[in-house]
Image (cartoon, rainbow, N blue to C red):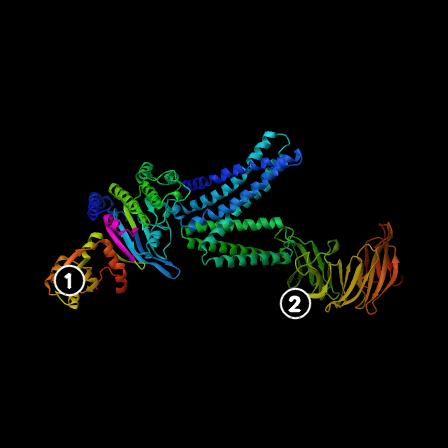
Amino acid sequence: MSPTSARASTVAAVAVLDLPAAARSDTAAGALAAAPPPLAAEAITVRYGRRTAVEAVSLTLSEGTVYALLGRNGAGKSSLVRCLLGQQRAAAGRALLFGRDAWRHRAALMAQVGVVPEQPDAPPRATARQLARFCRPLYPHWDGGAFEGRLRRFGVPADLPFGRLSKGQQGHVALALALAARPRLLILDDPTLGLDAVARRAFFEELIGDLADRGTTVLLATHDLAAVERIADRAGILAGGRLVLDEEVEGLKQRFRRIWVAHAAAAPATALDAFAPLAVQETVTGDWGVETIVTAYDDERFRAFQSSAAGAGARVASLTLEEIFIALTGAGADRAGAPDAGGSR
Amino acid sequence: MRGLTAVLRHEIAERRLLLLASLVLGLLPLAAPLMAAGAAAGPELRDTAALVLAVTLSGLSALLLGASVLGADLASRRLAFFFSRPLAGAAVWAGKLGAATICAWAAGLLVLTPALLIDAAAGGDEGSFLRGSLLLWPWLLVWLCAVALTVLIAHHAGVVLRTRSAWLVLDLAGAVTVAAIVLWTLRRLQYWGALPDPLPVAPLVAAVSAALGVALLAASAAQVIDGRADPVRGHRTLSLTFAGLGLAGALAFAALAQRWIAIGPLDLDRWSFAAVAPGQTWIALAGPAPGPREYGASFLLEVGSRRSVHVRFARGADDTLPLAFSADGRRAVWVEHQGGQGTSPPVLVSLALDRAGAMPVRTPIVESAPPAKLVLSPRGTRIATASGRQVAVYELDSGRLLAAHTFGDSQRWPATVVFRDEDHLRLLVSREPAPGMGALAVYDLDLASRRLAGLTTLPCSWRRRLSPDAERVACHGVHHEAVAVFDLAGR
């Protein structure tokens, strides 16, 4: 896919999502104003022996939010997701789904939750059709037609054992099962891990379609940042088990910027001092000048910076979610110390 | 219930190939009669082959299904599929283990089906062996329970071995501790005569299997319901529940055993034996006690203080309780088995009745079988044992044999022995010189010289009694209705 077509696809996806998002906001402001949030984590801590995998993570998802939970391998995403699903008991804190404790009321709550796991976990000898037959009596709003329709759209044979399907097909079956239950909350744990680009795209297209239709609340733990950027309202970054960032994606992209200053304009040291009001996250210095990623960008501050001697000729560019993620959790962040959402270096 | 049904149906459907294969395997025994030498043995051979195949297949199925139905899913994280659904943990547990058990049962029954159908079609007596075997309800029940227990054991082992977490140490330590407590308690109960020695195998296996089954069932339920899809937490819950229940059960058994053992003489259901010591301060009591069937307890009770000593009177020949008090009432001697009642060698045990707080002391005197009679010398320093045709006299404290004599074949009953003093004994030995003719030979035994001297022979047939000074004998004469008294001093 060319960059142009990719951008067009992104714009189209955002356009599709815009209308239901607005509708969802109206609904939320009305009858459901007092309803408990679909998902809330209250200072969840997970330990494996002496190792702390998740440390006091708190977050709340309001109705209709699409939340991207990002983090490097071993950051604690899957442990957090298992706690949220009531499959694993937190060492401290608790997970609430629709206001009820996920550990205590797991069975009842799962009727409203669709789950797509990191590793497809359906019984390998069962076919997709048999899996649907198994799930049908368990869910009050099971939509068998939608399940069959999705399998057709994905091109997954309904009568082949799950264990003999490709990884992509297994992921598609898992999504079809999750969506056929017409859940109010969808929790996806790195669902596209190991999927090829086509399968990944089909997966997200289907997800976007469902979001557009029903306004489901989604928690999506993933490494697939490009795809997430298209659909997520909010993003959280887990690093070393701590939630180091939890913010609206648009706001995040607004305040994270890359700024270049040529050497000719000022000495590097002088330029770095001048960057301070913009809160520097990462700096690269070369013969050509200084490149920084700032975390407190706004137009007024940037104009003030440009008007200074050190910032003359400075140029600014937006960052993708992936670039922001790398800036916060990558090698640069490691060197700089623990990532900080409002980073000032 | 809807969840349980869904899981059960799904799990059985997943194993439909096993059921189909069982039905096909059931055709194999039909070929067995072809190998039989005679036509008459054919049906029996077929039925035997079907039974053996059914038991083997159901056992193997129970082993494999039990080890994999939950353990494999847990280890591969596939159990999360079920916990991501609106399914109660109990439904997942019961559905999966229930399906494994049903499939193992069904595999066995399906193997039998062709042979049973042939039997039914043949009618008459043919095939009665298989039908008869299936109608033996106790064995059918044993088979069903054994299959279910195998599923549970295999599940436990499967989880433990697949998870291989540090909780394995608790599994091993728990198993060893529980086994040690149970064995120790069983030995104690045997020691005090509450359980027979050797233990009866069938009831013991049934009891252990039932206890094991309950503990495994509870542990597996806790593992799935509380551990959910988390293998380490699951293993921890499984181990803690199993070890906890095992330990609680073993301790409860030990406590119950202690309650049975630590009874007093007044707890006896009734007194089947009582003997009063000279001076009438001590009583020996024995009788059935609360506890296991046929459990009997024995006591020495000091009447004044109500102090009692729980003893283990060994039964002698003719179901007698060999017990002797010294003439001064200061010492009691009886026979106990060294270990379990009835199997270990009997030893003479002595208790100083005149010393407060004294406990029974084993003497060095060990006999090959409990003697029928024990007689203490007047000062309680020597003891005579009469058993069968043999009389022996020992020094009580050292266990030194002072004299022993075996009487001839014509002796009918164990000798009656009376100490005339510490060194001299008088013995009455029944004889039957001719059929229907009774006689009572009287001997004097001198311990210093070890000389046994015949004194006289009296025309007594049965029931004789020697006076305390051993000078007179009362007995039934040749004619049973008459009682004669003989003065041995005057002869």
Of badges 1 and 2, nearer the viewer stands 1
B177 left or right of B395 in image: left
- Magenta stretch? A221-238
Q: Is residue B274 magenta?
A: no
The residue labelled by disc 2 is B358
Find residue A121 and report its horizontal and vertical position in percent.
38, 47
Q: Residue at x 21, y 49 (%)?
A: A3
Picture layout, residue B386 above or below residue B155: below
- Which percent across, then down, holds residue A163? 40, 44
Tags 1 and 2 touching, CB below 8 Å: no
Q: Quadrant of the C terminus of chain A?
A: bottom left
Amino acid bearing label 2: Ala
What percent of the width, then of the height, locates residue B1? Answer: 42, 41
User: Residue A264, can we see it?
Assistant: yes
Side of B164 where A29 appears, left or right:
left
> Residue at position x 73%, y 54% from top?
B319
Q: Tell me if mark 1 has few (under 14), some (14-19) or many (20+) residues whose alpha carbon lies within 10 angstroms of its own.
A: many
Q: Secondary structure under badge 1?
A: strand
Residue A8 location (% of width, % of height): 19, 45
Viewer-nearest residue: A235 or B289: A235
Quadrant for residue B140, please give it. Answer: top right
Question: Mark 1 — on which chain does it sit?
Answer: A
Please indicate whether residue A336 sits to the left or right of residue B388 in the image.
Answer: left
Identify the secondary structure beneath mark 2. Answer: loop
Q: CA distance from mark 1 to mark 2?
A: 103 Å
Labelled disc at residue A261 = 1
Between B341 and B171, which is closer to the camera in this rendering? Answer: B171
Please indicate, yes or no, whether residue A337 appears anywhere in the rendered image. no
